[in-house]
């Protein structure tokens, strides 16, 4: 009788422990902002940074389908934070932190993400009648993607003397790109602009 009671209590104890295992859930939609549709075929990974440091751990991964949706359910563990990583060829990567406190065992965390197609702009500057080393061209970007390693910055750029050169920058696809310019010899100024083409390169020529 005592053995049966002991086994029954042990079973109940084990069952209670299993019930205490808590989980987090996360879902959302990933959008292609360039074409206004789901980012079909993109790879999405949810990474966990352990509390106290250590190697990043993958807690969920998914390939985005035609509806753009993703959903993860995983065991709750102590962590410093989480990161969402989204990649697709010829699109800008998404890598964003998600705080541990954003999750709850009682409610699914819903987060939506979007990214844009890549495009490239070649800026071709050509001084067609250079007359002195003092020829000066100043140009400053007005519109275009910012805050990425190979984007064109918004600082003023200065080009001196005889020039026939090209700079290439990355930008968002199917969006305006423009810069303001001022040349000293001959004196001329204005704005050069072009609409980028997703997955392709456009050239913006300035002859002065």
Image (tube, rainbow, N blue to C red):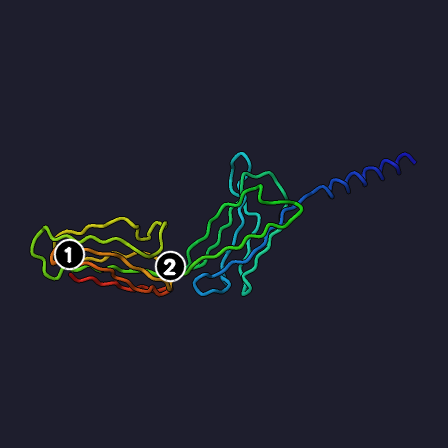
Q: Earlier in the sequence, mark 2 or mark 1?
A: 1
Q: Is residue 102 left or right of residue 36?
A: right
Residue visible at 45% across and 61% down in the picture? 33
Q: Where residue 59 sits in the image (x, y, percent)?
A: 57, 47
Disc 2 from disc 1: Cα separation: 28 Å
Q: Where residue 96 sits in the image (x, y, percent)?
A: 48, 48
Q: Which mark is residue 172?
A: 2
Q: Is residue 76 left or right of residue 150?
A: right
SS under mark 2: strand
52 relative to 199, above or below: above
Residue visible at 46% across and 55% down in the picture? 87
Q: Where residue 54 sits in the image (x, y, percent)?
A: 51, 37
The one of 55 and 73 positioned closer to us in this rendering: 73
Q: Is residue 2 left or right of residue 142?
A: right
The one of 129 and 40 positioned closer to us in this rendering: 129
Quadrant of the image containing the N terminus:
top right
| Residue beneath disc 1 | 163
Considering every residue shown, the one lying at the far right of the view is 1
Q: Which mark is residue 60?
A: none
SS under mark 1: loop
């Amino acid at each position: 009788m005592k053995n049966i009671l002991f086994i029954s209590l042990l079973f109940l104890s084990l069952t209670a422990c299993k019930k205490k295992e808590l989980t987090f859930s996360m879902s959302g939609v990933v959008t292609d902002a360039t074409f206004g549709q789901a980012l079909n075929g993109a790879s999405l990974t949810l990474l966990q940074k352990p509390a106290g440091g250590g190697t990043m751990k993958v807690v969920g991964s998914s390939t985005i389908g035609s509806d753009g949706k993703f959903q993860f359910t995983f065991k709750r563990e102590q962590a410093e934070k989480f990161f969402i990583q989204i990649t697709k060829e010829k699109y800008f990567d998404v890598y964003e932190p998600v705080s541990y406190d954003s999750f709850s065992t009682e409610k699914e965390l819903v987060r939506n993400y979007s990214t844009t197609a890549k495009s490239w702009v070649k800026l071709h500057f050509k001084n067609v009648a250079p007359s002195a080393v003092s020829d000066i061209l100043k140009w400053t970007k007005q519109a275009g993607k910012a805050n990425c390693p190979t984007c064109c910055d918004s600082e003023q750029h200065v080009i001196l003397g005889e020039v026939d050169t090209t700079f290439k920058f990355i930008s968002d696809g199917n969006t305006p790109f423009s810069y303001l310019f001022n040349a000293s010899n001959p004196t001329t100024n204005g704005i050069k602009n072009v609409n980028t083409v997703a997955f392709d390169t456009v050239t913006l020529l300035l002859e002065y």
